[in-house]
Structures are given as C-alpha cells and as structure tokens.
C-alpha cells in the first residue's frame, strides 16, 4: 500500500502523458489538461512545503538560541511580512508587497548574482591556466566570445564580433548539440525506468 | 517619499551584499537572511495567488469538484512534515514524478534528440556544415563509454572533447558577460538612482 500505490500512480500519470502526446483526442487530451492543472497545484504545495520546512528549521534555531539565531528571527519576520502583505493586500506595485518586491527582492537578487562576477573572475584565473590543449581551447573560446560581445572588442579588431558569432554558430553549436542529444537519451532512459517502476529512489527509504 | 525610502533600503542592502567581497560579516549575513525570507515569501504568495487560487479554489467554488483532487494531493505533500503520516506524501510525489517523466520522455526525444539529429543532417557542401557534422559525431563518440577510449576511437573522442571545450568556453564567456552586466546594473543603480552622480 505504502510503496505499491505510488508506483501505480507514477505509471498511470507517465503513460497518460505519453499516450496523450501521440493521441491528443478525447479522453486522453482532456485528461492530460486535467492532470496538468493538478500537477501545477501540487508543485505549488511542494513549494509551500519548502517554506514550512524553512520556518521549522529557523524556529528551532531561535528556540534553542543557537549561534546566529537573530538572523533566523530576521528571516522569519521578513518571510511573514512578505506573505501576509501579499496574501491580504495583493501583489500590485503600490502595495506593501510591491514595495518589498521592488526595493528588496529585486536589488538583493541582482546583487547576489552580480557578486558572482567577482568569483567567476577568480575561478577563471584558476581554470584558465592553459596547461593542456583542452584548457587552451576553453580559454580562447571564452575570451573571443567575451571580446565579441563588448564595444572594446570591435575597437581592438573589427572582426571580433563576427568571429564570436561564428564560434557560437558552428563549433559551439556542434558541442551543444551533442550535449543535448546526450541529455535527451539519458532523460528518455531514466524516464522509462521511472514509469516502469525500475527506478524507485524517489520514493525514499523505509516503509 | 516611499521612492526615496525604497532607494535607500535597496542601496543599503546592495552595499551589505557587496561587503562580502571584503569578508563574511554581520551586514552580509543580515542581507542574506532578508533575501531568503523575502524570496521564500514572494514565491509562496506568487504560487498561492497565481496557481492555487485560479487552478483549484476557483474551479471548486464554481462546482467543478474534480479539481479538489489536486488540493487533497497537495495536502498529502504537506504531510512530509509529520513523520507518522509522512508516507502519504509519496502519492503526491509519485504523481509529479510520473507526469514529469512522461512529459520529458516525449518532449526531450522530440526537441533534444530527433530535432537535433535532423538539424545535423546537412549537405557536405561547406566547411561550416562539415565542422558541425564532425563536431556532433566526435562529441557523441566521447559520450559513448561502453567502449574503451583507445586507438582511433580514443583519438576521435579526443576531437569531441575539443568541441565540447569550445562549447563550455563559449557558455562560460556568456555567463561572465551576464554577471558583469548585472554588476554594471547595480553600479548604475548606486551611482544614478541613489547618489544621483550620473544620469
């Protein structure tokens, strides 16, 4: 019951998606739409589960007064304010939620990712020491693409943008295409294993 | 007034995050925890307002009770936090895993395998076409691990690695440019919107 029913559910859901792709008529087409709507709602609940877990972990940290519990309190306060303002007063620009989105969520997200520019610079210094042909190719491709995408590149040599476009359109495309085909074959095989119940690790351990 | 307060809050948080470049410090930790709290809150509100309400609550309130199934399965997902009945969450997980597997099986086969193979079947009438065909074939040979990479097979796989390295380098270059572009955006915000030193 605890392990067999999930396997049946996986099989039925997976097979319906495959059948409805090849036979998009009723009843498969309608069922697929219904399942899709169920799916997005369940995924939303999964995200809510993640938020509940976040609350649990941080509340526990505050309760036990572990080091850094003050930060957990800040986290829970900002989470609560964002959720309450968004659920009760809407997500529009002029609401409290809109204010939080504009002045906290967007700048924090952008700055976090921009910070990676510095770490990428130090990582590339380590990675780009061209000791082998492979590392040299990676270095040259990266530098040419970067130079081809900034005004400085065309200022140094007018052909840099064209060269960057050629790298993107041909050697890069060939490599990306092989990766995509590899990913597709891997996805197809793992999907089949899951649908047929051979791969069961997603059910976790225990009864 | 709210615009000015908002700009100051955004600027302070931006500087707090950049302070990590010196070393880990309380200001960075504060901004980091605010970011986690606000992000989690944002996505919860977004999912509830844009997914749960229109796809479950509204249809059920209109008498289409079949949509309550997603709510029941969603609640089953939440049982994960209760150890005694946590096994119920497997039903919801099984449904999402099954749906994703079935969907990816056909779409990946179509878009990532068949379409890519079709696009590679090019006439051998230009150096660029030959380059693409050679690149795809050699890189695919590199991914074939059922045969030891020795002799001609190994050398062909080596050429495949070169193509893959160029692809990784190009992707890396693109990622760097995207991050630098974000950095320029933040600097522009600080110097223009906040300090008003530039237009």
Image (cartoon, rainbow, N blue to C red):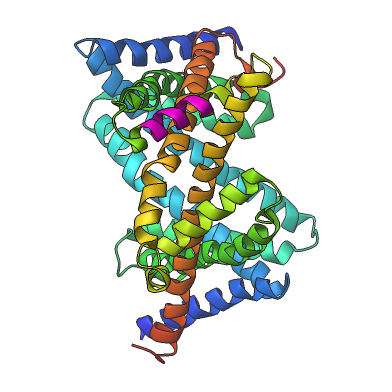
- Where is residue A205? Give x, y as percent: 70, 20
Q: Quadrant of the C terminus of chain A?
A: top right
Q: Nearer the viewer, residue A176 or B150?
A: B150
Residue extending furthest left?
A25
Is B131 included in the stretch rendered in magenta?
yes
Q: Please identify the quarter of the rendering in which residue A106 is found.
A: bottom left
Q: Residue at x 62, y 26 (%)?
A: B155
- Where is residue B111? Give x, y as percent: 34, 26
Q: Nearer the viewer, residue A33 or A164?
A: A164
Q: Residue at x 58, y 54 (%)?
A: A139
Principal secondary structure, stretch drawn in magenta: helix
- Where is residue A115? Give x, y as percent: 57, 66
Residue stretch rendered in magenta on the structure: B130-138
Q: Please identify the quarter of the rendering in which residue A33 is found.
A: top left
Q: Nearer the viewer, residue B108 or A177?
A: A177
Tell me if I can see residue A79 in this picture: no
Q: Please identify the quarter of the rendering in which residue B145 is found.
A: top right
Q: Residue at x 55, y 58 (%)?
A: B37
Q: Quadrant of the N terminus of chain A?
A: top right
- Total numbered labels placed on residues in the image: 0
Is B72 included in the stretch rendered in magenta?
no
Q: Residue at x 19, y 10 (%)?
A: A26
Residue extending furthest bottom?
B197
- Where is residue A149? Give x, y as percent: 39, 62
A156 with respect to A76 (left or right): left
Query: Is B183 placed above or below A190 here?
Result: below
Query: Is B115 placed above or below A16 here?
Result: below
Tell me if I can see residue B56 in this picture: yes
B91 with respect to B111 (left or right): right
B167 with respect to A38 (left or right): right
């Amino acid at each position: 019951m605890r392990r067999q029913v999930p396997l049946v559910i996986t099989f039925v859901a997976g097979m319906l998606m495959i059948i409805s792709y090849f036979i998009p008529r009723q009843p498969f087409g309608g069922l697929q739409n219904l399942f899709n709507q169920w799916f997005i709602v369940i995924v939303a609940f999964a995200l809510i589960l993640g938020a509940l877990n976040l609350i649990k972990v941080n509340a526990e940290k505050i309760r036990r007064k572990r080091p850094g519990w003050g930060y957990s309190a800040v986290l829970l306060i900002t989470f609560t304010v964002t959720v309450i303002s968004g659920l009760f007063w809407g997500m529009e620009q002029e609401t409290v939620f809109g204010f939080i989105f504009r002045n906290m969520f967007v700048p924090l997200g952008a700055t976090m990712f921009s910070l990676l520019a510095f770490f990428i610079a130090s990582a590339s210094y380590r990675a780009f020491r061209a000791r082998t042909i492979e590392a040299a190719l990676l270095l040259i491709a990266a530098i040419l693409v970067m130079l081809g995408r900034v005004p400085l590149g065309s200022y140094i040599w007018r052909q840099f943008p064209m060269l960057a476009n050629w790298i993107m359109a041909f050697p890069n495309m060939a490599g990306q295409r092989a990766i995509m085909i590899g990913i597709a074959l891997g996805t197809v095989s793992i999907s089949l294993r899951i649908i047929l119940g051979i791969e069961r690790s997603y059910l976790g351990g225990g009864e | 007034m709210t615009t000015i307060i908002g700009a100051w809050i955004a600027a302070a948080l931006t500087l707090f995050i950049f302070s990590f470049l010196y070393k880990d410090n309380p200001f960075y930790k504060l901004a980091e925890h605010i970011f986690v709290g606000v992000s989690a809150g944002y996505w919860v509100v977004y999912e509830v307002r844009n997914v749960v309400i229109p796809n479950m609550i509204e249809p059920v309130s209109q008498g289409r009770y079949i949509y309550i199934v997603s709510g029941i399965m969603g609640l089953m997902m939440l049982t994960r936090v209760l150890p005694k009945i946590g096994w119920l969450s497997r039903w919801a997980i099984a449904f999402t895993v099954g749906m994703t597997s079935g969907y990816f099986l056909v779409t990946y086969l179509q878009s990532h395998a068949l379409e890519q193979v079709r696009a590679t079947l090019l006439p051998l009438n230009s150096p660029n076409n030959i380059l693409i065909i050679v690149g795809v074939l050699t890189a695919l040979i590199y991914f074939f691990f059922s045969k030891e990479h020795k002799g001609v097979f190994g050398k062909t796989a080596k050429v495949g690695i070169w193509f893959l390295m160029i692809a990784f380098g190009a992707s890396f270059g693109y990622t760097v440019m995207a991050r630098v572009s974000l950095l320029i955006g933040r600097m522009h915000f600080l110097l223009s919107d906040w300090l008003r030193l530039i237009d």
